[in-house]
């Protein structure tokens, strides 16, 4: 038996990966399978994202290494933690904090729009996560309802850093179109280069609209029409959306990035003022049993 085969056998004995016992299927991505697993000693639940390295082209490998390096430096109560990476020659296992309460997209599709209070609490947590990552010069570039997960007790966890990038400074220009078109900022269609933070801010405006109305602000049956709607920022906010929330949406969904609200303006807006931001101010969470074991 060659050394590589031995390593794989040691890592995946039966339904076990390293110290993690694999228990069930969570879902599939384009290049990944995600399984539920337990740490054998601490019994902590984790999500095991499994990637078949032999199926990854050079570009996907590059995105994956960015995802890992972004997640390795993020420790925030509203961001999915990457606990560790287990490697074999053919596979890569990302051991992630488990968010067992489903995602925002499925929740809205099955239960309809969120009530005003739930929208505020959810948006405030996303905002807290985005403020934190932008302070570290990490731009997510794929904020969308499918990537907003919940724990079983309803805490928001922003996930999927596959398109994220770390910029030298907030003023650094980027030039790759990333993310999902309905959430893409106008400058991604219009300009050769763009600034990172306003692109995440725009996607948060689309998310906010989706949360409070249960529909997307920009919808079209062809990509060309969708692009036009976004570039013209042509959307209609239903009149029953509370005024302060309407003002926030309008402050975010501005076609010119320079005129768009910045994260700190969103934090101070009327609609969110009744919400406290313990997450933005809280010291890092004390390590849980799994974290203590890994550190
Ligand atoms: P793609 O990356 O191809 O766009 P995706 O984002 O759905 O697709 P994954 O990130 O691999 O792909 O996720 C696959 C499934 O696993 C999704 O349903 C996602 O909600 C779920 N999932 C991912 N991470 C976690 C996690 N930490 N906890 C619970 N479920 C998760």
Image (cartoon, helix red, strand yellow):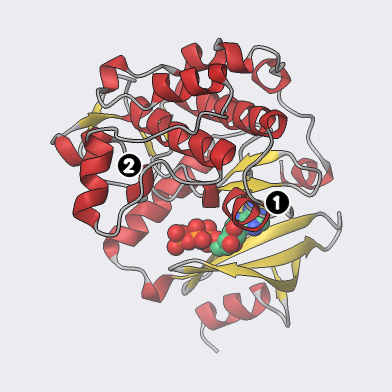
Q: Nearer the viewer, residue 113 or 10?
A: 113
Secondary structure of the residue carrying tag 1 is: loop
**Would you name the residue on which mark 1 appears?**
99
Task: Give x and y (percent) for residue 145.
Answer: 53, 47
> As displayed, is residue 20 above or below residue 64?
below
Q: How far apart are marks 1 and 2 (CA)?
A: 25 Å
Residue located at (43% from left, 51% from top): 162
Residue located at (30% from left, 15% from top): 259
Secondary structure of the residue carrying tag 2 is: loop
Q: Nearer the viewer, residue 179 or 213?
A: 213
| Disc 2: residue Cβ within 8 A of ligand 1's nearest atom | no
Residue located at (65% from left, 27% from top): 120
What quarter of the picture does the C terminus occupy? top right
Q: Can residue 136 be seen in this view?
A: no
In this picture, residue 182 sits left or right of residue 3: left
Residue contact at pointers 1 and 2, CB within 8 angstroms: no
In this picture, residue 37 sits left or right of residue 200: right
Q: Which of marks 1 and 2 is nearer the N terminus?
A: 1
What quarter of the picture does the N terminus occupy? bottom right
| Disc ID at residue 85 | none
Q: Nearer the viewer, mark 1 or mark 2?
A: 2
Taking the image in four quarters, ligand 1 sits in the one at: bottom right
Q: In which quarter of the image is residue 267?
A: top right
**Would you name the residue on which mark 2 appears?**
184
Q: Can residue 281 be seen in this view?
A: yes
- Looking at this view, name the residue that lies furthest to the left: 192
Task: Give x and y (percent) for residue 125.
Answer: 64, 30
| Disc 1: residue Cβ within 8 A of ligand 1's nearest atom | yes
In this picture, residue 141 sits left or right of residue 125: left
Tag count in the figure? 2
- Looking at this view, name the residue that lies furthest to the front: 239
């Amino acid at each position: 038996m060659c050394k590589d085969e031995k390593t794989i056998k040691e890592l995946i004995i039966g339904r076990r990966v390293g110290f993690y016992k694999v228990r069930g299927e969570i879902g599939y991505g384009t290049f990944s399978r995600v399984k539920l697993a337990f740490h054998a000693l601490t019994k902590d639940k984790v999500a095991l994202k499994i990637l078949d390295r032999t199926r990854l082209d050079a570009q996907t490998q590059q995105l994956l290494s960015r995802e890992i390096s972004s997640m390795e430096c993020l420790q925030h109560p509203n961001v999915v933690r990457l606990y560790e990476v287990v490697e074999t020659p053919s596979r890569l296992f990302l051991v992630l904090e488990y968010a067992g309460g489903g995602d925002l997209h499925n929740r809205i599709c099955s239960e309809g729009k969120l009530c005003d209070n739930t929208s505020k609490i959810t948006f405030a947590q996303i905002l807290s996560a985005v403020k934190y990552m932008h302070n570290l010069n990490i731009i997510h570039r794929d904020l969308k309802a499918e990537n907003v997960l919940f724990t079983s007790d309803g805490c928001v966890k922003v996930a999927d850093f596959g398109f994220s990038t770390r910029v030298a400074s907030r003023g650094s220009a980027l030039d790759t179109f990333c993310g999902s078109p309905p959430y893409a900022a106008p400058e991604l269609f219009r300009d050769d280069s763009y600034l990172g933070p306003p692109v995440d801010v725009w996607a948060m405006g689309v998310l906010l609209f989706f949360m409070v109305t249960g529909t997307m602000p920009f919808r079209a049956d062809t990509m060309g029409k969708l692009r036009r709607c976004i570039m013209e920022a042509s959307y209609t906010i239903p009149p029953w959306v509370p005024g302060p929330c309407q003002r926030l949406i309008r402050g975010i969904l501005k076609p010119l990035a320079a005129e768009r609200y910045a994260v700190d303006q969103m934090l101070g807006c009327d609609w969110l003022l009744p919400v406290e931001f313990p997450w933005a101010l809280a010291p890092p969470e004390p390590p849980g049993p799994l974290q203590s074991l890994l550190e």
